[in-house]
Image (cartoon, helix red, strand yellow):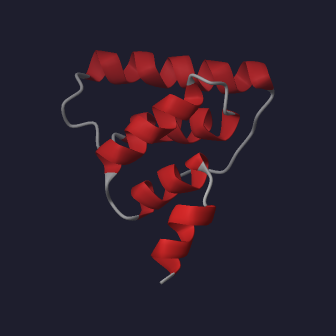
Amino acid sequence: MSGLLCLAACSDYDRARNAYEGGDYKLAISRFEALAVKGDTKAQYDLAQIYFQGIGTEGFTEGLVLVAVSRWHGQCGRDGSTRRFV
């Protein structure tokens, strides 16, 4: 029942977190990326941590992961955000 309630009441960020916590990393990355490009600093930070930890990024080469981590951590730093680790 709580899953149904979340569909109606959760924010896009909550949906991304739920996908991550449920182990659907590809969906979580997709949702976090969509939020991150819109300036959501929580999503930017969580996405950077996912890339940094290599979670769900098996198809990425090491160089692309480093670029992605650098990009999202840099954005979070410019926004003054400090968030918890994923």
Residue at 42% of width from left, 55% of height from top?
20
* In this view, 63 is above or below 32: above
Of residue 54 and residue 18, the one placed in the foreground of this image is: 18
- Give the quarter of the image for residue 38: top right
Residue at 22% of width from left, 22% of height from top?
61
Residue 59 in sight in this render: yes
Could you tell whether 80 is left or right of 29 in the image?
Answer: right
* Residue projecting furthest to the left: 59
Image spot of residue 25 (x, y percent): 33, 49
* Residue projecting furthest to the bottom: 1
Residue at 41% of width from left, 46% of height from top?
28
- Give the quarter of the image for residue 42: top right
* In this view, 6 is above or below 40: below
Could you tell whether 65 is left or right of 10 in the image?
Answer: left
Could you tell whether 74 is left or right of 80 in the image?
Answer: left
* Residue projecting furthest to the right: 80
Circle count: 0
Image spot of residue 40 (x, y percent): 66, 33
Image spot of residue 54 (x, y percent): 34, 40
Residue at 49% of width from left, 50% of height from top?
16
Could you tell whether 76 is left or right of 29 in the image?
Answer: right
* In this view, 74 is above or below 85: above
Of residue 1 and residue 42, the one placed in the foreground of this image is: 1
Residue 55 in sight in this render: no
